[in-house]
Amino acid sequence: KKKRLIALLVFSLLQDAIVPYIPTLIDQLTQKLLLVSKNPSKPHFNHYLFESLCLSIRITCKANPSTVGSFEEALFPVFTEILQNDVQEFVPYVFQVMSLLLEIHSDSIPSSYMALFPHLLQPALWERAGNIPPLVRLLQAYLEKGAPTIASSAADKIPGLLGVFQKLIASKANDHQGFYLLNSIIEHMPPESIMQYRKQIFILLFQRLQSSKTTKFIKSFLVFINLFGVKYGAIALQEIFDSIQPKMFGMVLEKIIIPDVQKVSGPVEKKICAVGITKILTECPAMMDTEYTKLWTPLLQALIGFFELPEDDSTPDDEHFIDIEDTPGYQTAFSQLAFAGKKEHDPIGDSMGNPKILLAQSLHKLSTACPGRVPSMLSSSLNADALQFLQGYLLAASVQLV
């Protein structure tokens, strides 16, 4: 075990200096991989073998991204054999290495990946807990690099993806993985390709909310609905809720967004929620001239609290126990490869700037569209601390309300 770790450290330390020797090393590693796949009886050796592959890919492709094709040429035949023979110990590793390779591509998805895509949606693959995290990541890489290709190549691919999402969100153990996949679908798929499925997606989420609401699910749900609002607009979000049931948008604001947004954690997740709520406050006419208007100030108050108060990390006592259906018998565990690690993806990026400044600018724009309304709503029901924080945002943004 020490020798394998030392070899990996040498790889890591040498970095660019090892590039000229990579073709020989890959040939040796591939042969070794093919050999041990026949009898994968040494888990530590296997893990370090895949780590070495990932490190070789990272070092070489950092120096020259076009060499990714050479790795695919060498590895795909072995990967195909592993997948066809269903070598359970190796399948999660193969998905991680494939994700790493696909994420290096700068433009479209190569045909070799598209040929494999339908097989990744097979229900049997998703029955094993160890396959789920790397498979979700691999599907996310497909969506990031080739959503238009997926949308145009065959009509059954989107229902297949949504079928995977439906299976994952039904599980308390894997629902967050279902949201990772759903968020990628919303972010990357051409809007017209998923238009017909959008209402059904929300209905499925509400069914899960009614049957078994957990803190983890609520946090993921909040990120999703705000990402949807950022992508498609606050009006589309309000309309889709109200098309499921009249006045449902108000119920979601009152029962979920306002009381629970403080639970959301993670810088990217917090940014998505901040931008999404800002859009609901300032770009949704129903918030200004319907029965939803009474929720405008409480929503703004919740957003300012979201910016300024500590995160609510409490968990109800009954959520400390995992349901028996989510603890199946022994299955190959998922082992994360350190050198296959993925950068955290920010679907908003820098386009929206500082969320506090964005809120101030958006409120300024809203107040100029309906003079007098915003200041009167603030003075009548926003608490003093929140008002003081808001005045600080307006000052920092060099704008004022009219």
Image: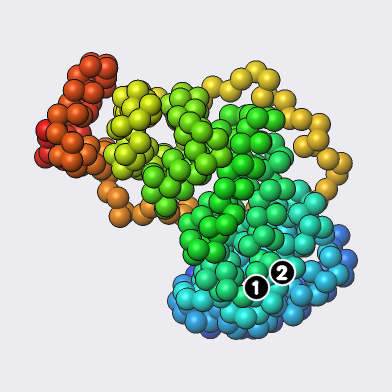
Q: Is residue 197 above or below residue 275?
A: below
Viewer-proximal residue among 317 and 340: 317
Q: Is residue 82 above or below residue 317?
A: below
**Residue 339: % across, % down:** 58, 60
Residue that carries the numbered disc 2 in the rendered image: 118
Left or right placement of residue 255 versus residue 136 in this view:
left
Q: Quadrant of the N terminus?
A: bottom right
Say which quarter of the image contains residue 213.
top right
Neighbor class of circle 2 (other Cα within 10 Å; few <14, some 14-19, many 20+) is few
Residue appearing at x 68%, y 20% in the figure: 318
Instruction: Residue 93: give its label.
Output: none
Total number of numbered discs in the rendering: 2
Q: Residue at x 72, y 48 (%)?
A: 167
Q: Badge 1: how crowded within 10 Å, few (<14), some, or many (20+)?
A: few
Q: Residue at x 26, y 19 (%)?
A: 382
In the rendered structure, find residue 154 and report the number of the disc placed on it.
1
Can the viewer see residue 97?
no
Please name the amino acid that badge 1 sits on. Answer: Ala
In three-dimensional space, the C-alpha distance between marks 2 and 1, rounded to whole angstroms, equals 10 Å
Q: Secondary structure at mark 2?
A: helix
* Three-letter code for the amino acid on which mark 2 is drawn: Pro
Percent coordinates x, y for residue 301 in the rendering:
32, 24
Q: Nearer the viewer, residue 197 or 212?
A: 197
